[in-house]
Image (cartoon, grey):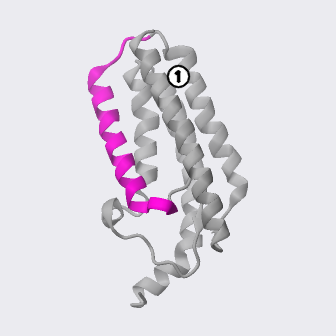
Amino acid sequence: MTAAEIILALVTLQRGLELVLARRNTRALLARGAVEIAPAHYPLLVVLHAAWLIALWTFGHDQPVETIALALYLVLQALRVWVMATLGRRWTTRIIVVPNAPLVTSGPYRYLRHPNYAVVAGEIALLPLTLHLPGIAVLFSVLNAAVLLIRIRAEDRGLAPSRGAREQGAP
């Protein structure tokens, strides 16, 4: 196996395990009365991420590894873990809103409204650059930005009542 194949295998495994965790968290949240917001765009997100991985496997499996880009990608993985740990059982790949639950404002959410999306945007750009694939980095960064525009607007609408309550001093 090449170094690129090992990296891609680890990323693919990570994404698969994250989907399992997200599905478990989603079921638990929905069972507690949470609501999914804007589910229609979710298949587009899945296709985008699957196509990104397929493109990386297709064109990057035998590429040399750029160590600086890989190091930056690994920093993003630490940030991803921080986001997931901060959200705990509320972390999911879907937009799930728990009515009357306070917004998470600790961890990376102290600094950014959507830190997970910032991490994903960085990953989508950096992993292809790690494998010397700038075209894939640009293409999927643009596509991801379009999907995130839809997603962030939907999420902000779904969380608006919680934000409004927080800004008015509610617990």
Q: What residue did someone put label 1 on?
A: 56
Residue 133 position, x and y percent, is: 45, 20
Residue 129 position, x and y percent, is: 39, 25
Name the residue at the bottom extreme. Answer: 169
**Is 150 rendered above or below residue 72?**
below
Residue 93 in view, yes or no: no
Residue 14 position, x and y percent, is: 49, 35
Q: Quadrant of residue 123?
A: top left
Residue 109 in view, yes or no: yes
Pick the quarter of the image with the C terminus.
bottom left
User: On the picture, is 40 further left or further right than 64?
Assistant: right
Residue 38 position, x and y percent, is: 68, 62
State the residue at coordinates (60%, 54%).
24
State the residue at coordinates (39%, 47%).
80
Name the residue at the right extreme. Answer: 40
Q: How many marks?
A: 1
User: On the picture, is 48 further left or further right than 3?
Assistant: right
**Residue range highlighted in magenta:** 63-90
